[in-house]
Amino acid sequence: MLSLAFQFQSPGPILFEIGPVAIRWYGFLIASAVLIGTFLSQYLATRRKINPELLGDLSIWLVIAAIPGARIYYVLFQWQEYAQNPAEILAIWRGGIAIHGAIFGAVIAGTIFAWIKQVSVWQLADLVAPSLILGQAIGRWGNFFNSEAFGTPTDLPWKLYIPPEQRPPQYLNYEYFHPTFLYESLWNWMVLGLLLFLFFWGLRHRERLKVGTIALVYLIAYSCGRIWIEGLRTDSLMLGSLQIAQVISLVLIALGVAGLVWLYGFKSPLPDVISPKTKRQNKRNS
């Protein structure tokens, strides 16, 4: 009888070393995600007849804002730990970033960029959302190589081995855990497929897919998966007895649903941050 068993075990966080310099899987995956995501957003921009160089410039802004945002968010909720070891705050290559912090940082940077360039922030959000979820799908494997962000103990065929030094104190006698990095990565690939389907469907039905829809669907779809996956994790950022990621995910779902109701229920465009001059120009071009 065929046995479907997939035991995961990290080979370690180091990809390769050149003398005293160590190239880590985490950094390599983040860099790869940024490059691939930029190419994807530029390709999507050309399909919507938007200058792809605009997305190349935007990607620089997003990286500058998202990576520090992800780290600051994580450190704030783990401040008791980092207050005792402040030198570790900058050690981002060891892991310890939060996607919600990256999203908040990217939203701020993207809004400022849209205002300066006099373009629709929702148009940019639609083009960036597929790249963002693609980056999340790739980046989650950094958790695998760092043996972090795993779930509770399990004996499922696809169990993940965690070395003793990486296990929470209450689970020292357990060897295998839920590979939550894999669950979220697979979920993100499915969300990417959904967003790309909507994007290309919208190219054929421009009058039916409104600007901002893809970004709002991203918020809802990603957050739905994050809620149940976060419930399995043993290292969630907490605020009292609440898992912060689940609370933020619920808020993002509510915002996404409200946005879609606004778009398709009231049949009104989403409030934008572009200037009156650009609004008048868009109105003339519509």
Image (tube, rainbow, N blue to C red):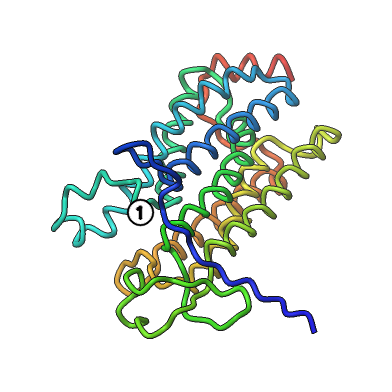
Task: Examine the rendered structure and indicate whether residue 36 appears above or below residue 230.
Answer: above
- Residue 169 lies left or right of residue 210; in this view the side is left
Task: Examine the rendered structure and indicate whether residue 271 appears above or below residue 16.
Answer: above
Toward which corner of the image does residue 16 lie, by quadrant? top left
Name, please, the residue furthest toward the front.
Answer: 19
The residue sitting at 51% across, 17% down in the picture is 117
Q: What residue type is labelled 1?
A: Gly
Where residue 285 appears, x then y in whole percent? 72, 15
Q: In terms of secondary structure, where does tag 1 sit?
A: loop
Query: Observer-nearest residue: 138 or 121?
Result: 138
Query: Observer-nearest residue: 261 or 161?
Result: 161
Q: Residues within 10 Å of mark 1 (few under 14, many from 20)?
A: some
- Residue 104 lies left or right of residue 211; in this view the side is left
Task: Examine the rendered structure and indicate whether residue 285 appears above or below residue 147.
Answer: above
Where residue 139 appears, x then y in whole percent? 51, 48
Toward which corner of the image does residue 17 lie, by quadrant? top left
The residue sitting at 81% across, 32% down in the picture is 203
Residue annotated with mark 1: 96
The quarter in which the C terminus is drawn is top right
The count of marks equals 1
The residue sitting at 62% across, 46% down in the picture is 216
Where residue 86 appears, x then y in whole percent? 16, 50
The residue sitting at 38% across, 46% down in the picture is 70
